[in-house]
Amino acid sequence: MSQNKTVAFHTLGCKLNYSETSTLSRMLEADGFQKLDFEDQADVYVINTCSVTENADKECRQLVRRIQRRAPASLVVITGCYAQLKPQEIASIEGVDLVLGAAEKFNLSKHLQDLTKGDSAKVCSCDIEEVNGFNAAYSHADRTRTFLKVQDGCDYGCTFCTIPLARGHSRSDSIEGVLEKVKELQDQNVREIVLTGVNLGDFGKGNAGGRLREENFYDLVQELDKVEGIDRYRISSIEPNLLSEDIIRFVAQSKKFMPHFHIPLQSGSNKILGAMRRRYRRELYTERVAMIKEVMPHCCIGVDVIVGFPSETDEDFKETFDFLHNLDVSYLHVFTYSERPNTMALDIKPVVPIEKRHERNKVLRNLSYQKMQYFTAQHAGETRKVLWESAEKNGLMEGYTDNYIRVQTSFREEWVNNITDWKIS
């Protein structure tokens, strides 16, 4: 495909996907493509998909139909987790021209060179066991905070999860490689970097999986803390069994790592945690939260939780609710369990009715709102550092304190991407 073509991207799913989409965009722009908004009429549309829930699959299909109505002659490329898991299913969607699996995602530019609108989609995908390379990625110019991918894949076998099937074995960048990317971001006046990965605490495994380097996540955060010119780091999400005492104590004394952890729980019932094949029990989770609050009372703690997992009874859900209600955490990300093909959870019975799953989701979302209100109120009257974002909406701008409290004020151009003192009301 010749230069001066236009391309538009749409991302479904996690922060990792956003970092990869942003990197793909920069690669195509370097090859002469002009990036447009997804709602504009472009020559090429790229959808980077998720497949954590059935809704993500449906949304991908809906986006393709929208493109077909708006720009039927445009090329449509699907990549990401859904593309790796079900390439032939996606190829059968009317309007799709190219499906790129995990190993080919970062070869997008090469595949576009000779791609033409045709009757059948071209599929470039391999068995996930053959995917063993690590491709560094980061988002920039899309948001104030930059998502820096340092790890990919997962070796855990949670019964509800398709991510190992979609992304392959756990593997990561080297510390040296991460520091090189941080230097690039520093040169672009980035103020805050969010470290992202599928299983971030497993950092240190080489390209083919297996611990080929004597490096781990604790080593990485220590080295990043020494870098001049970057004001803030956040740890996007880390498994409780991999969140060590050393990491917690290091963040507590660091001037650059923000007092903010996001720690997946998934259930407050040990019975359900066992059925999920999680690698910890609720007692360990309680210990981690208690230690964080001991050394950082002001720390914000976010929690992932799944409702409606097969065999979850009303008593199990109440156990989860009571556990979270009594836990000193700040907010919840609540996911309704969704049946995913080729996962072991499909064999677990009884199945929780859809209506009951949605009811439980609503209950925990209400609890999350109350938790965040309480956490914010605890800090009322304090002056904390806020990094202001660039988006303007109705004359207002938003920013986040070091401990992840969202604040708003009248838009001021000179505050964009700057850190100021702010008294929390």
Image (cartoon, rainbow, N blue to C red):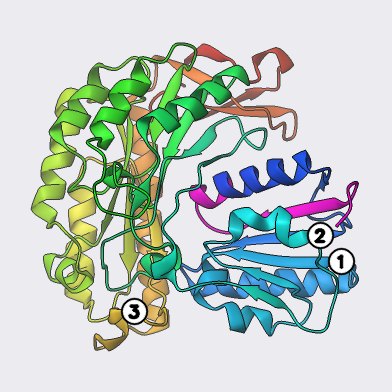
Residue 248 location, quadrant? top left
Residue 39 location, quadrant? bottom right
- Residue 98 is labelled as none
Question: Where residue 208 sits in the image (x, y, percent)?
Answer: 35, 55
Q: Is residue 362 rendered to the left or right of residue 199?
A: right
* Mark 2 vs mark 3, CA separation in Å: 34 Å
Residue where numbered disc 2 is placed: 44
283 w.r.t. 382: above or below: below
Q: Earlier in the sequence, mark 2 or mark 3?
A: 2
SS assignment at label 3: loop
Q: Is label 2 in contact with label 1 (beta carbons under 8 Å)?
A: yes
Residue where numbered disc 3 is placed: 343
Please, what is the three-letter code of the amino acid marked with disc 1? Ser
Which mark's residue is nearer the viewer, 2 or 3?
2
Which mark's residue is nearer the viewer, 1 or 3?
1
Please, what is the three-letter code of the amino acid marked with disc 2? Val
x 12%, y 58%: residue: 281
